[in-house]
């Protein structure tokens, strides 16, 4: 399959991919959210960035704001079983199967084909976690930038440092985390392409506006680091600052 034209397309019924091309050449970056339907902050962050007319200045940006719409509507990790939705965890179905009876496995294959066609330099998936990250508690993810293949991509360290210059309360701190998951989208794609793969995880203990602001910041810092969209205006205002971090 050739690369997609600018505009938006459907990967599957109601699963949209926005293709944004810059006037200058540069790397392709793919950002995806909503593969787990109860992890909503990344979905909101990407929809807000699209509504704010986020546009790359170099290269190409692909955005899939809601990878699993039925799970997102149900606010559940996986879609409730119905029709050819089998209630499978979509992020454990990679690389998928185009002729599978379950829609999750077909959708995983469709996403995999998109990635193979587009050859992104970065694949970033936005997630959330019920547990605040602690290095001795595994699994615990919020908030970390997770990579599955060693060595740690240098961009992970740079973006964590920049986030921690901005989100400075102890509960807000970010950390890198190595956590391989063999059948996850990120892992399988990194193995197939040799690209950088990052899962962004925010902690659900924060109010939703805080998590959305964090997810927006991470996406913008990654786009800046890859040279796709340099940051030349302030990141999200800190009016969203956490007030009930333990609630
Ligand atoms: Zn998730």
Image (cartoon, rainbow, N blue to C red):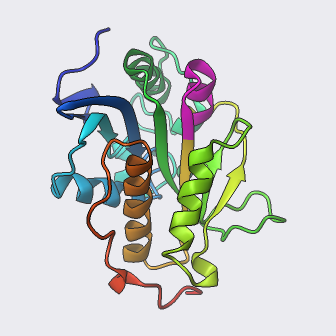
Residue drawn at (18%, 22%), measured in percent from left and top? 5
**Residue 155 located left or right of residue 54:** right
Residue drawn at the location 33% of the way across and 41% of the way down: 228
- Which contiguous range is marked in magenta? 186-197
- 94 or 160: nearer the eye? 160
Residue 194 in magenta? yes
- In the rendered view, tell whether residue 100 sits above or below residue 228: above
Res 15 visible: no
Pick whichever, 168 or 88, lies toward us: 168
Give coordinates of residue 11: x percent, y percent: 30, 26
With respect to residue 64, does 44 lie above or below? below
**Which image quadrant for residue 215?**
bottom left
Question: Which residue corresponds to the image point at 45% horizontal and 13% vertical from the top-left?
Answer: 98
Query: In this rendering, is residue 35 above or below 48?
Result: above
Give residue 49's position: percent from left, percent from top.
Answer: 25, 56
Q: Nearer the viewer, residue 18 or 20?
A: 20
| Residue 119 visible in the picture | yes
**Which residue occupies 72% across, 46% down?**
179
Furthest toward the right, the residue is: 136
Q: Position of residue 200 (x, y in %)?
A: 53, 53
Name the main secondary structure of what is drawn in magenta: helix
Left or right: where 203 falls relative to 139:
left
* 128 left or right, relative to 20: right
Q: Quadrant of the C terminus?
A: bottom right
Residue 61 counted in the magenta span = no
């Amino acid at each position: 399959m050739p690369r997609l034209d600018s505009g938006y397309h459907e990967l599957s019924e109601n699963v949209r991919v926005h293709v944004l091309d810059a006037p200058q050449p540069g790397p392709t970056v793919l950002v995806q959210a909503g593969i787990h339907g109860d992890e909503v902050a990344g979905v909101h962050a990407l929809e807000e960035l699209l509504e704010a007319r986020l546009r790359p200045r170099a290269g190409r940006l692909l955005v899939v704001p809601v990878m699993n719409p039925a799970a997102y509507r149900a606010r559940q990790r996986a879609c409730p079983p119905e029709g050819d939705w089998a209630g499978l965890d979509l992020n454990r179905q990679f690389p998928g199967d185009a002729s599978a009876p379950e829609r999750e496995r077909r959708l995983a294959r469709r996403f995999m084909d998109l990635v193979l066609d587009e050859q992104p330099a970065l694949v970033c998936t936005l997630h959330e976690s019920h547990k605040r990250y602690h290095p001795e508690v595994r699994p615990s993810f919020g908030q970390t930038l997770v990579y599955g293949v060693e060595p740690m991509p240098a961009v992970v360290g740079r973006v964590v440092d920049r986030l921690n210059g901005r989100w400075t309360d102890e509960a807000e701190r970010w950390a890198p985390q190595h956590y391989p998951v063999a059948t996850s989208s990120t892992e399988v794609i990194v193995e197939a392409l040799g690209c950088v793969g990052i899962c962004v995880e925010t902690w659900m203990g924060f109010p939703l506006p805080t998590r959305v602001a964090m997810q927006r910041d991470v996406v913008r810092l990654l786009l800046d680091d890859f040279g796709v969209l340099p940051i030349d205006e302030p990141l999200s205002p800190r009016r969203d600052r956490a007030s009930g971090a333990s609630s």
